[in-house]
Image: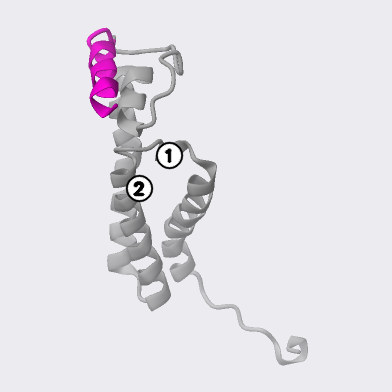
Amino acid sequence: MLAQSEERINTRLNKVALVRYDVTTYGFLDTQFPRVLIDTGPVGLAVFVWLIRPLFVIARKTYRRASDPLFRALSLVFWQDLFGMLGHSVGCNTFIIVGIMEPFSFLAAMIVKIPEIQGAKAVTVPEEAAI
């Protein structure tokens, strides 16, 4: 089964142009990287990698610069999740599964905002407003 699927991918890749525009015309292929390569070509795969790389950089910078242990833990977990998802996507269409990408995108947004949150001044609540 795997050899047959690999043979289909290789024959299709021989026909892949530099830039593709016919997304999802190949049929069912349950693996992320060959799917991106077949659907969008080598340029599309390069763009995919170009979009993923800043997530590693941001997570690493946030981990190194965060002073709060919660923020350090969140950025470390995000970094590990990104490695895990890239490993998982070798054999599965990880980046198109909504149940995976929705919490991952939320966590990515949190990681991007951590430096801004740390730089903000704490708001003091007046005594009369406290409950």
Q: Three-letter amino acid code at disc 2?
A: Met
Q: Where residue 84 sits: x, y (%)?
A: 32, 52
**Left or right relative to 129: residue 90:** left
Identify which residue is drawn at 31% across, 22% down: 37
The reply to whether discs 2 and 1 touch (Cβ–Cβ < 8 Å) is yes
Mark 2 to mark 1 CA distance (whole Å): 8 Å
**Left or right relative to 99: residue 23:** left
Is 90 situated above or below 107? Answer: above
Q: Residue furthest front?
A: 1
Prevailing SS of the magenta stretch: helix
Of 80 and 128, the residue lying toward us: 80
Identify which residue is drawn at 32% across, 38% down: 91
Identify which residue is drawn at 33% across, 18% down: 38
Q: Secondary structure at mark 1?
A: helix
Q: Where residue 86 sits: x, y (%)?
A: 31, 44
Of 121 and 65, the residue lying toward us: 65
| Label drawn at residue 85 | 2
